[in-house]
């Protein structure tokens, strides 16, 4: 339970660290986006400051700027000659605003200027950003009168109201006027120009004072509308987003790797604890096994005494009932003695002493040892073994073969058949099969036949096949059971080491 709580704590800490990394990367991405937006707005401010400096350089007659010259600058900034694409500054369109906030000079793609930007001052869309900035010269005097810069239209448009025959080039002096310069620059203020930076109505202007004031009011430069492309901003944002995603991905992979490593460490620790406990239990079982073997060995001595005394009584001249009972005691003592011998044999440590053995000779001697039982049931035994020499412990090999042959003799019916088949295999190996035509083993019992004390024979002890498996494993071999078609059983011992 404690290990489970510790694993939950470790996994929770790893998940928390990963979530912190995710939050950190999201915050950094938002910071990068905000910095990119700030940089874009700073570029719009720089463009506005540059245009303000240009306005100061192009002024004439106090606060006036010629539209022809200003349009050249605006078109270059908007880059209209490049198919209305964003130039190096990313400017899509420019519009100059008058006192009423209405555009009166535009350049670039003016369709991209949303009306909402004129009231909100800043409007962001996916592809563009529109910013409204004040232009230098938009200031308030002590009398709260605007001193804005006026953009004069081209002279040909400005002089359309002059009657025919009285138009003149602004570089020429009007006929009969010897004080042109003084009249344009040093005339005292008049009501016609009041409220518009002190501009006087030129003497050649034939319109009314109201027309002149309306013309000047619509030409006062108060602000600048810039529409700039956000393509660079989106590229920076996307690149940073990919980088943050990679960081989050590898952080997740790292957290997952640490989690898996901790899981393996926890499993390894648990397995080590289990191995220690299993080793302790194994040691305890070995001690119990030795104690049981010793007890079984010590039990045989009084059991032999009981058997001998019962045998003496059965041979005496006593009553027949007593002799019969004594013979039954002898038979039961023999059964118990056989079981004790099997148990002692099973519990005995297997010390393998390998030597070169002729497999055919070993099988022949085992068959000869059980010849009485074989002839009693008229069993046919066939030995089909190639002339092979294997490396094995001779005594253990004969004991294993004896138990397998005895198991087959007990299983087959009268006049049955048993076969010993051995053949060489690849990589200096061989296999030995003991086949019979008995009833075989039921499918539900095939996984238990090598377990101690499991038997299907009434007279069996259940340790014969367990001893065989113990011997086979001690010598590095393998044994397995298969069904023999059409009936019977096959016990195959494989991985026998063949020697020259």
Image (spheres, grey):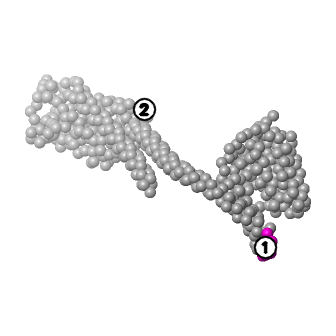
Q: Which residue is mark 1?
A: 318
The quarter of the rendered structure image containing the C terminus is top right
Q: Residues within 10 Å of mark 2 (few under 14, many from 20)?
A: few
Give the tally of numbered discs.
Answer: 2
The quarter of the rendered structure image containing the N terminus is bottom left
Up-down relation of residue 306 to residue 6 (above or below)? below
For the point 57% across and 52% down, the residue is: 287
**Picture coordinates of residue 470 (x, y %)?**
69, 50
Q: Is residue 121 visible?
A: yes
For the point 76% across and 50% down, the residue is: 399
**Picture coordinates of residue 311 (x, y %)?**
76, 65
Range covered by the magenta-colored residues: 316-321
Q: Does residue 75 appear left or right of residue 493 in this picture?
A: left
Q: Quadrant of residue 247?
A: top left
Q: Residues within 10 Å of mark 1 (few under 14, many from 20)?
A: few
Q: Which residue is mark 2?
A: 82
Up-down relation of residue 288 to residue 390 (above or below)? below
Q: Nearer the viewer, residue 61 or 295?
A: 295
Identify the element where label 1 is drawn. loop
């Amino acid at each position: 339970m404690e290990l489970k709580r510790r694993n939950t704590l470790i996994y929770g800490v790893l998940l928390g660290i990963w979530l912190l990394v995710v939050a950190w990367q999201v915050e950094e991405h938002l910071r990068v986006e905000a910095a990119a937006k700030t940089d874009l707005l700073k570029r719009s401010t720089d463009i506005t400051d540059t245009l303000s400096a240009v306005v100061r350089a192009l002024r004439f007659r106090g606060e006036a700027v010629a539209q022809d010259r200003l349009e050249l600058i605006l078109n270059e900034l908007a880059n209209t000659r490049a198919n209305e694409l964003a130039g190096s500054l990313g400017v899509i369109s420019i519009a100059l605003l008058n006192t009423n906030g209405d555009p009166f000079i535009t350049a670039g793609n003016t369709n991209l200027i949303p009306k909402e930007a004129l009231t909100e001052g800043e409007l962001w869309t996916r592809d563009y950003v529109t910013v409204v900035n004040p232009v230098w010269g938009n200031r308030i005097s002590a009398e709260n009168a605007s001193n804005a810069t006026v953009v004069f239209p081209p002279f040909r448009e400005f002089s359309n109201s002059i009657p025919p025959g009285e138009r003149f080039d602004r570089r020429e002096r009007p006929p009969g006027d010897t004080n042109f310069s003084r009249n344009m620059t040093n005339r005292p203020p008049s009501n016609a120009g009041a409220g518009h930076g002190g501009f006087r109505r030129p003497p050649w202007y034939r319109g009314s004072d109201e027309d002149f004031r309306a013309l000047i009011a619509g030409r006062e430069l108060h602000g600048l509308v810039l529409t700039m492309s956000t393509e660079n901003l989106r590229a920076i944002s996307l690149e940073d987003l990919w980088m943050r995603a990679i960081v989050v991905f590898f952080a997740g992979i790292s957290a997952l790797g640490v989690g898996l490593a901790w899981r393996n460490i926890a499993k390894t620790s648990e397995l080590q604890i289990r191995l220690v406990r299993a080793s302790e239990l194994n040691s305890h079982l070995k001690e119990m096994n030795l104690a049981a073997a010793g007890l079984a060995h010590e039990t045989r001595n009084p059991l032999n005494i009981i058997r001998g005394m019962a045998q003496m009584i059965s041979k005496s001249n006593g009553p027949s009932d007593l002799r019969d009972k004594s013979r039954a005691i002898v038979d039961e003592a023999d059964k118990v003695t056989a079981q004790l011998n099997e148990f002692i044999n099973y519990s005995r440590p297997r010390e393998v002493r390998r030597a070169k053995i002729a497999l055919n000779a070993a099988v022949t001697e085992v068959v000869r040892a059980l010849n009485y039982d074989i002839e009693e049931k008229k069993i046919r035994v066939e030995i089909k073994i190639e002339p092979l020499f294997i490396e094995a412990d001779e005594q253990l090999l004969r004991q294993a073969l004896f138990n397998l042959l005895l198991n087959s003799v007990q299983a087959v019916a009268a006049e049955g058949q048993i076969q010993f088949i051995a053949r060489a295999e690849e990589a200096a190996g061989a296999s030995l099969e003991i086949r019979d035509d008995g009833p075989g083993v039921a499918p539900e019992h095939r996984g238990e036949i090598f377990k101690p004390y499991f038997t299907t024979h009434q007279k069996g002890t259940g340790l014969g096949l367990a001893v065989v498996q113990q011997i086979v494993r001690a010598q590095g071999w393998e044994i397995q059971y298969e069904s023999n078609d059409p009936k019977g059983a096959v016990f195959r011992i494989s991985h026998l080491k063949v020697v020259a």
